[in-house]
Amino acid sequence: MEQRTDRPQGVVVFVCATCGVRLTGPLMPLPAVPEAPYHAWSEADEPRPLPATVPSGHYAIETEPYGAPLVVAEVPGPVMPRLGTYRNAAGQPLVSRGPRGNIVVDPDDARGLELQHAAPACCGAAPDGGMNQVCGSCGTLVATLSSDCAMPYELHLSAAHVRAVRPTRR
């Protein structure tokens, strides 16, 4: 049996808010989303995701806007946390006006998710197209995966589409 918690604290698992299926194993909170790990690429490297931003077994709450929609910015800057500058076809800088409060986890800590669509990227999923992960049980969009080789490797669970529950012994 699992007990629901409205504000994630302590060890929790995240479940689909629609059907209740577990989407992660037990995770401990971090005080903030860490900076993306640095990785020096060489010409010999095969394209693959960077090391995960959030260590395995942990989660953090994203306080900045993340994901679609992207809108024209008055001042150039990162389009989203831990990402560089994006520009539209007219050369204008873009910023995210997506939701705040996403739960950021190591993508390898997720379970039961399926990639529905991904914004074009060289070798993985990009977050600028919006949510791209569905619950494998009920098909609800629940998360945004960033897994392209040139982007931070992280999974953003939508706070509006998942809920935290305390794991209990069975």
Image: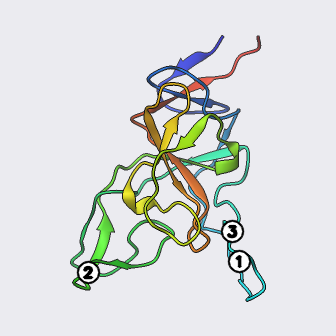
Badge count: 3
> Looking at the image, which is closer to me, 153 or 59?
153
Q: Find disc 1 in the rendering and name its residue.
A: 39
Q: Looking at numbered disc 1 in the image, what kind of residue is underneath it? A: His
Q: Looking at numbered disc 3 in the image, what kind of residue is underneath it? A: Arg
Q: Find disc 2 in the rendering and name its residue.
A: 89
- Badge 3 density bin: few <14, some 14–19, many ≥20, Cα 10 Å: few
Residue 65 showing in the rendered view? no
Q: Nearer the N terminus, badge 2 or badge 3?
A: 3
Q: Are marks 1 and 2 in contact (CB under 8 Å)?
A: no
Residue 79 falls in image quadrant: bottom left
Q: Quadrant of the image for the C terminus?
A: top right
How far is the residue under mark 3 from the one under mark 1? 11 Å
Q: Indicate the position of residue 6 as horizontal and vertical percent values.
A: 47, 26
Answer left or right for 127 relative to 99. right
116 vs 41: above or below? above
- Residue drawn at point x = 39 percent, y = 62 percent: 128
Q: Nearer the N terminus, badge 3 or badge 1?
A: 1
> Which of labels 1 and 2 is toward the front?
2
Residue 153 falls in image quadrant: bottom right
10 vs 122: above or below? above
- Residue drawn at point x = 63 percent, y = 15 percent: 2
